[in-house]
Amino acid sequence: MSDASSNGDFYYGYARKSGMPGVRNHPLIISMSGLEYVVARDLAAHFTDAVLVSTMYGRGHVGEDLRFQRHMMTALATHPNVGGALVLAPDRLIAEKVSNAVAESGREALSVSLDDVGEDAAKMFERASSMLQELISQLSVQEPVPCPISQLAVAVECGHSGASSGIVANPLVGEFAKDLAARGGRVLFSETLEWTGAEDVLASRAVTTEVADKIKLAIKRRHQIAVRNGHQIGDGNPGPQNHAGGITTLVEKSLGAIAKGGDQSILDLLGEGAALPEGAGLYLMDTPCFSPESITSMIASGAQMVLFTTDQGNPYSSALAPTIKVTASPVAAKLVNQIDFDASKAFTGYATLVSLLPDLSELVYEIASGKKTKAELANFGTEAISRLGPSI
């Protein structure tokens, strides 16, 4: 399917009855609480074609935290890269809340709760195995079809950043982001506190004063959370990996981080896990500043892929969305089982940043069309949903 990457007009994806096409057609196991998690874990180990999304905190939520948890689990269960879902839950009511949403999205929806099997985990595993085997069989015969590049949304992330990130890897991904937006696609990045010191730069690129104000307020709120809990953002930030990579100040780190979105206009600031709007271009998302929660929040928005830059190496990857690891560090480039795109030639002066863009673009569209990332080959991926409050 290399033709998809060679002309850049389309990729091979999976059309959905509603919403964006998927770049994968995952059979999903989604576990709604810690009570049935072990069953879900064992199913995922037995059926390696399936992807597991789980939470240990399926009961006891209240208020905003309850609403957010339910939103995130439903958003992940109906993600473009999900072909169908098997919902495991402690009771029938919780199972139906998510499985009904999956069915309404036009996907195959199956569910089994501990209620259904008399609280017997062994019976749950047996029943779920039969359901999952049938789901995998159904999805395996579905063929990808040409999908326009305008139907692609990419989350961009950086982690364990260093000088090579700010100078090459992030600007390179930023150039890809601009090109994708020009083709009608969408790009987003998050980690709000990673914008500290770059507020004015981001605000100046906002399409309206309202969006500019939202960006500044989001950063201020995250700082207030830290202060209320006796933490200063500058404490340990930049961290040891950042220092090892040559970053000396927080502002330096932030300016490098925001380069991965390019220099295009910012259309809006989205709430954590909120759905991406329809318009092509660049969006920001207000999230915690560590990669797992940040990436999962952007995946919940509907992003089908992740471009993840690193200087020192960072093993985290999404379970649902192929995560393309990009580095310009000669050190991280040696992580042959982790890095998908080596841009170190530009950092060491043997290539220009612009000369690498066609190769990066080709790789992205190849992976959108089915080529597996290093993390996918290793079956190394998960999702992490933020907690917004205590359980009762």
Image: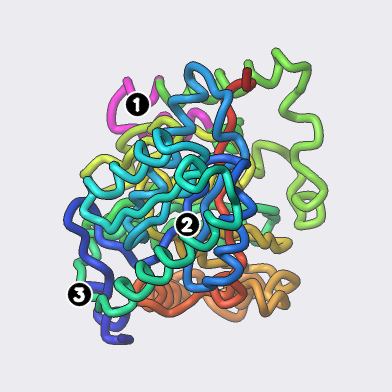
Looking at numbered disc 2 in the image, what kind of residue is underneath it? Ile
The residue at which mark 1 appears reads as 211
Left or right: where 381 falls relative to 361: right
Cα gap from disc 2 to disc 1, whole angstroms: 37 Å
Looking at numbered disc 1 in the image, what kind of residue is underneath it? Val
* Mark 1 element type: helix
Quadrant occupied by the C terminus? top right
Cα gap from disc 1 to disc 3, whole angstroms: 35 Å
Q: Position of residue 67 (x, y in %)?
A: 43, 25
- From this viewpoint, is residue 255 visible? no
- Most common secondary structure along the magenta stretch: helix
In magenta segment, residue 211: yes
Quadrant occupied by the N terminus? bottom left
Which residue is at the far front?
A: 118
Q: Which mark is residue 146?
A: 3
Residue numbers of the magenta segment: 199-213
* Mark 2 element type: strand
- Circle 3/circle 2 CB separation < 8 Å: no
- Circle 1/circle 3 CB separation < 8 Å: no
Q: Which is closer to the viewer, label 3 or label 2?
A: 2
Looking at marks 3 and 2 on the same chain, the residue that comes earlier in the sequence is marked by 2
The residue at which mark 2 appears reads as 29
Q: How is the image coloured?
A: rainbow
Who's the residue at 48% across and 16% down the image? 63
Which residue is at the far left?
A: 17
132 or 275: which is nearer to us?
132
Is 73 located above or below residue 388 in the figure?
A: below
Looking at numbered disc 3 in the image, what kind of residue is underneath it? Pro
Is 62 located above or below residue 314 in the figure?
A: above
* Mark 3 element type: strand
